[in-house]
Structures are given as structure tokens and as C-alpha cells.
Amino acid sequence: MPTNPDSDKNELDGRTKLLRSRPEPDLILFFGLCTLIGSAFCIIGLISLIWWIIDEWPDIFGILFFILLLMLPVAYTLYALDMLVWQVKGAETVSYDENGIVIHLKKLFDRKTIIPWNSIVKVEKFEKPWWTFFRRSYLYDASLRIHYRLENGPPYTIKFGLLLNEKQEDIIIDRIYELQDMFSTKMEYNDSAINLFTLENARGLRATITNLGGRVVSLFVPDRNGILRDVVLGFENVEDYLPENHRSDFGAAIGRYANRLNNGQITIDGKTYQLPQNDGKNCLHGGPDGWQYRIFNVEKEGDNRLVLSLVSEDGDSGFPGNVCARVTYMLTDDNALDIQYEAVTDEPTVINMTNHSYFNLNGDASTDILSHLLTIDADHYTPIGETFIPTGELASVECTPMDFRQPKPIGRDIAADFEQLRIGRGYDHNWVLNTKGDDSRPCARLQSPVTGIALEVYTTEPGMQVYTGNFLDGTVVGKGGVVYQRRAAVCLETQKFPDSPNQRWPESDAFLRPGEVYRSHTMFRFSKQ
């Protein structure tokens, strides 16, 4: 039965509609005839049974056998009548409210199915069997199906949306995901509202971002076949991002200081500040209460732009100064996720912000990233000691597994007999970028040979930490129920060098003083090969 996708805010039985089917005259005629024919067989069979009983009075087994035969036309008639009522009443409606999707089948006995937003795992097109071509596919098949799992229950699948064309299918799938993002993640935490925002551009790039930690929750990018792939790791539900449930950095805006600070200490103007030690003796990513767990204020929201801000008070996790920070996300017309960071302070402090997205350009986090081709425009990197703190040396990448100046699969040398890879359990190092803050040319490139999706990185930062998911261990279940295994993603964290306030590298100044404005720019530009 033809259905019309409709994303307008029209009310339908008190709910907003996604699909509404309309009666088909030829089907009404068809099922009407089937009902008449079936009824005729039932009447003839019933009269025959009565006549047989009166005329011969057969044994009880004969009567039962005849009744069983009579049940076939009865069942056929009831089915035809059910389909006829379905057509006359308008068949089915697929609507939604804040609780979930409501699928209402208006048949002889009305049936209504409610699918809560948080239970939806996947929405996909249904590949129709060849024989439905001869039946116009409205008798036995549907165009879309939703996989969902109720709390502590088994998985379910429901089909709907008869006779949608391919364009309509794509519209409905996108709309359902958009609505799921809108309704399933609104909640209160520490007396502040957590929301999810969807940004889109005209070329198919779509990002969902939450103000909890300024996290990029999903990033849909078209592959070489035009199929949208979610290329970042994360969770299905906002509750999973809360620190009491998971200590994760998925997609987060990291602050105050991204990466590690030796012994959890910094010294500013001769005064030493003790910070939390959440990575052995080091302070990692601002400590256990870093900005990845804070709720940002929403300053501006648009179709392709989102501005978030945060006030970090003096003494926050031991850091000095009241800091006002801002993160601006924008999807550009050339298919880039553009991120701008700004911050000011009223006392001397340190600042180092980055985005901690875990990328898997296969769009399938059940696969690893070892075949991804990585290029880094860097002649040097900063070696680390056993505690992951840089030794202070700027080492050459020449003739080492750290050389990515030409495209190379991440997995080619990752298991090489090399001291730095042993310490990091893979790549978890900072590269000294040759771009030296010039964000007009790419400092790195990542490409999936599976999907053809390519990612170029542009930044004003002097360094980039490459982390290959070495500590993902199969204990975290992410989007789509996928268990995140080791090397399921790679992070490209543009930032100041690790431990810069203590190492005092001239090319990596991480100090911020009153009257100064911290500015940082990173852009992830996507293309397909």
C-alpha cells in the first residue's frame, strides 16, 4: 500500500506523523471479492455439513474431519476481511511522540505497537524477495524494518512502510534517527539539562553533538557508494557517558589540559599547583573531573553550527584562575567538521583543548583500523618514558615505525620490535607537525580502503597525539551493541605537546595570562576516493 512520508509537524491522533497510508481502490475491490468468494465457500460448506448430518448422521470423526476442512475457507475469509477493513480504514499510520514510534494497524482488530526511542537499535531497508514484484509488494512485504530491544528483553524486529520508493525510505530512516536523537537523550544531571543537537550540511554530512562534555556522539559521512557511515565511536544512550557509568573520552572536548602532566603538577610564576593524579602519578585530560564530564552551556544553535561555553572556576581540579571557554562546531560546505576553541582567564593558568573523537572510517566499529592508511606531515615526534611522559627529546622519525610521512597502513609496524611501541602498547605518541600552526594545509590524512572515506586534518596546533585504541579491551559496549575491541579506532588529537608546562618547549606554549585569548582551530575534512 503506498505511504506518504511526512516530516511536517501535523497532528495525527494526537501525535506527529511519519507515515500515513491511503486506501487503494483496486485492493479494496480485490479483497472485497476474496471476502465474497470465501464467504460463499463457507456458506456452501456449512449447508453441506448440515445436510450431511440430517441425511446420514455420520459418526463423530467424520463431522470433525469435515469441520477441519471447513476451517480453511473460514480462515481465508477472515484474512481477506481483515485486509479489506485494513484498506477501508486507511491501513496503517506510523506516528511518534516523546515516548517513541507508534505503529497503528487499523484492521478488523486494531493493533498498536509502541517502540520506545531508547530501545531502537537499528533502522534499515528491507530487501524484498523477487516474487513480490508480481504482487506489487503490498501483500506480503514491507520496505523498512526497525530492530529494537526492550529493557532486559529479547531483540525484536518490526516491518512497516509498504511500497516506499528508495528516496522515501532514506527520508524516513534519517527522520527516525533524528527524532531518536531529539527525544531519547534529554535528561537532567546535576541540575543541568543535557541535550543532543544535530548539525547537517547540504552534502550529506551529519553530526550529533551533546552538551555533556561537548561530545561528538555520531558523525555520518557518505562513502564511495553514497551510503552514510557513522565514523566515530560512542554510546547509544546519554546515561552511558556519565562518569559513574563509564570513564570515557569518546568525542569529548577535553580541558583544561589535554594529555598528561607529569606528577600531576604545574608551576606558574614560581608557584606549584598540585592537580589530581588519575593516570598513575600523572594528571590526564584535566583529571577525573575534566571537562569531558561537564555540562556546557548552549550559546547558539543552528542547522550547521553549535556554540557551547563553560566556566571553570578558580581551583577547579587544582587549576588556577577563572577560565571562560568556548567551543564552536560547524559543518562546512566542503564536508568538514570545523572546531574552534577560545578561552580567557583572570589569573595565569594553563590551557590545552582538543577533540577526542575515536575514528573508524569503515563505519563499522566491529572491525579494526589497522588497514587504515595514515599520513602525518611530521619529521619528529616526542618519545615517552615508562610513565608516558615525554623525555624532552624531539626524535627523528627517519627509519623508525614512527615514520608516516608517506601513506602507510597503521598496522604495518604497530607490532614492531621498537621500544616506543612497547611502552605505548602501540601508537600513543605526539608528532611534531611540520605545518607549525598553518591550518591552510593538512597535517595528517586518514583513509579507509573499505569505504573509500578519507579524512584530512588541519590545525593551528604544533602537535598531534595519535592513539590507536590500545586500551580498548572488549569491556565497553557501544552504539549498535558493538563491543569495542582493541584497535577499533584511532584518535587524532591536535594539541600542545604533552607536559608542555613542565617541559617548556618554545614551539608549544601552553600558558594563558589575563588579557590574552587562547585560540585553537582544528578541521576534519572528509572526502571519498
Image (cartoon, grey):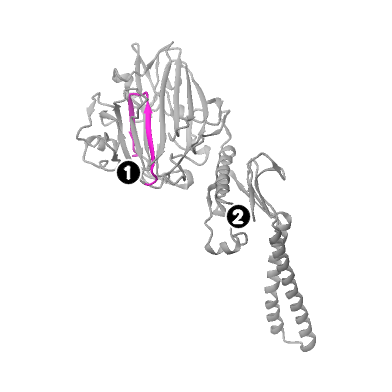
Q: In front of the other: label 2 or label 1?
A: 2
Looking at the image, which residue sits at the far bottom? 56
Query: Residue 270: horizontal and vertical position, in percent?
Result: 33, 11
- Kind of residue sitting beneath label 2: Leu
Circle 1: element type: loop
Local packing at callout 1 (Cα closer than 10 Å; few below 14, some 14-19, many 20+) is many
Above or below for 446 versus 107: above
Query: Residue 36: horizontal and vertical position, in percent?
Result: 74, 69
Q: Nearer the viewer, residue 426 or 137?
A: 137
Instruction: Give the residue displayed 27% in from the left and 26% down from the top.
Output: 390
Above or below for 381 versus 16: above
Q: Is residue 382 magenta?
A: no
Query: Residue 397: horizontal and vertical position, in percent?
Result: 23, 31
Horizontal arrangement in the rendering, residue 50 relative to residue 293 (left or right): right
Separation of marks 2 and 1 at Cα, in angstroms: 41 Å
The residue that label 2 is drawn on is: 163
Q: Nearer the viewer, residue 80 or 370?
A: 80
Instruction: Give the residue displayed 67% in from the left and 53% down from the top.
Output: 92
The quadrant of the image that shows the N terminus is bottom right
The residue that label 1 is drawn on is: 370
Question: In the rendered image, is residue 91 in sight?
Answer: yes
Question: In the rendered image, is residue 355 in sight?
Answer: no
Above or below for 144 versus 265: below
Q: Nearer the viewer, residue 313 or 351?
A: 351
Circle 2: element type: loop
Q: Over which residues does the magenta segment extend?
A: 450-470
Q: Answer with mark 2 or mark 1, whichever residue precedes in sequence.
A: 2
- Kind of residue sitting beneath label 1: Leu
Q: Is residue 456 magenta?
A: yes
* Quadrant in the picture for residue 407: top left
